Image: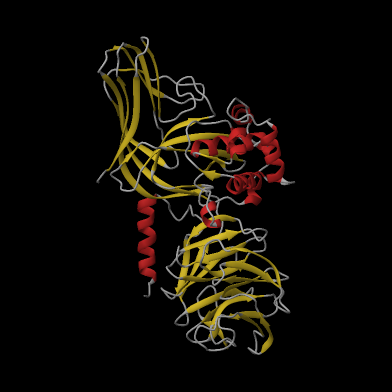
Amino acid sequence: MRVNNTWLIILAFAMFLVTGHSSVKAWPGEIVDSFDAPGRIVTGMTFDGKLIWVADRADKKIYGLDPESGKVKQTLESPAYWPMGLTWDGEALWNVDVKGGLPLSENYHGVAYRIDPESGNLLRTVKLSVRKAQGLAWDGKYLWVADDGNNVIEQVNAHDGTTIQSFPSPTGNPNGMTFDGKYLWISDRYRDEIYMVSPNDGSVIQILEAPGYYTHGLAIAANHLWAADSESDKIFKLVKQDDDKYRRYNPKKVRVTHTHEAANFGPGLLTNLDIHLAIPKNRPNQDIKGEIKFSKEMTDKPKDHWGQQTAHYNKQNIKPGERFSAQMTVDATLYEVRYFIDPAKVGSLNSIPKDIRDRYLANNEKYQFEHPIIKDAIKKALGDEENPYWMARRLFNYLIDNMYYEMVGGWNTAPAVLERGNGSCSEYTFTYIAMCRSVGIPARYVGSVVVRGDDSSMDDVFHRWAEIYIPGYGWIPVDASRGDKESLRDQAGSFGYLANRFVITTQSGGGSETMEWTYNSNAFWKTEPKTFVVTDHYADWEPVEE
């Protein structure tokens, strides 16, 4: 299916109306320009400083294109029968054949060809150890190959194909690949995403939306990311980096009714009941619409020492068999939010404002970050890392490697959770906060009510995660329990990303005179002797039509 430029302009305008982004403010992955691909099934792509080169599987050719007009300036026969990845080593082109140089069905064994860009003559043939070679990149010394068969990224010697290092691909379907001098960029045609990847260990740093449904080739040219898409038969010029710290998109209008109730089963009086409902406010992931509605008999709206406001209900002398309910209804527009962090642009820990350091580096009974268990874990996790972003990622990775999710009773202290090796979302969060604060990274938590499946649903489980302060970027969401996955992409998807399924009600540094260590809502009560009281709280969701 071909997409003309008129439709791309219409799509860009529609995105502006939906997201509120204009061409003045861009985000990584946004389409800047596009033109038609020269062949029928475009695969690999690279840039030699003057021309954008693209390989085409159907034509078995390599085309040199003017990056401004898209016009073909040069055409070479590919030495590959099944040409895929393409790269430039400063003097010559490289093209990989996924079928090992033989047009034989299911003969997947990679071969890389070094090609003279003037004559098209073959300069070198290198057999690769990969099973299904797709993307190809050059880092100045070695080749990098994306293996779609074994789902690995390999750095290989360009003379004999020896593997120098390898790590898992971000997902199970690596396709295109390029190198920008510091990071690898890898595309995935199933998730329709492009990943900025550390060549040291494969950590995914940024996740970009791909411009098409079969994005294959990638290249870096003139500070832009280029992508070749074989479904739309288009070459796309994309924003690579921008000053915008995050993008919010995919808005969803919802109504949430949060209820906290107490029932007195007797035999005596429930002499005093205090219920606090945490009141949400506008945040990057949510816009509160109109006035929040509260049930009758609200007493006041106090704020705790963290600045968290609650709707406070006080009820006295509740008889056996009676119940009391406090309720809050919120209309909101929720957004997906994705942060684009460049570790090179992260400031030092000393640049963090003093008031933030004073409030969000403090120790307490839940965190206990001076405990030997926490200290030992930090030593193992960090090594000599000093960049705040990578410090936070290494602590995040340490929890993923050394814990598993289990929702057990209670919210234990960080040392106890780490020693036990499992925990709930709250316990992952407390432990991550403790480790971050111990090394000078300010950290806090937020709590939310959650869409469970259908937009019309009920939530009585809720969810909590951490926010950390990254110098130069501000507060970033980090969900260690959700990020405890095998996939490097899914791990990164919980570091600087929020789905549009949360209404955040609570923000705290830990412990509160109204909310204590809980979130969303809290209750205190006093009774006559041997009186049995049960409390429950839940959120009912419904979509809101225009």
Q: Please give the name of the residue rendered at 50% of the width and 22% of the height, measured from the top-left corner.
A: 512
Residue 146, by quadrant, is: bottom right
338 is higher (above) or lower (below) than 182: above
27 is higher (above) or lower (below) than 312: below
Residue 121: x %, y % from top left: 66, 90
- Viewer-closest of 132 and 276: 132
Residue 180: x %, y % from top left: 63, 64
Q: Please give the name of the residue rendered at 30% of the width and 27% of the height, measured from the top-left corner.
A: 327
> Is 213 situated left or right of 252 in this image?
right
- Viewer-closest of 157 and 249: 157
Residue 500: x %, y % from top left: 39, 46
The colour scheme used here is: secondary structure
338 is higher (above) or lower (below) than 537: below
> Is 60 situated left or right of 88 in this image?
left
> Is 241 situated left or right of 128 in this image?
left
- Asked whether the viewer can see residue 51, the reply is no
Question: How many numbered dots are placed on residues in this image?
Answer: 0
Q: Please give the name of the residue rendered at 31% of the width and 44% of the height, measured from the top-left corner.
A: 253
- Asked whether the viewer can see residue 167, the reply is yes
Residue 363: x %, y % from top left: 63, 27
- The quarter of the rendered structure image containing the N terminus is bottom left
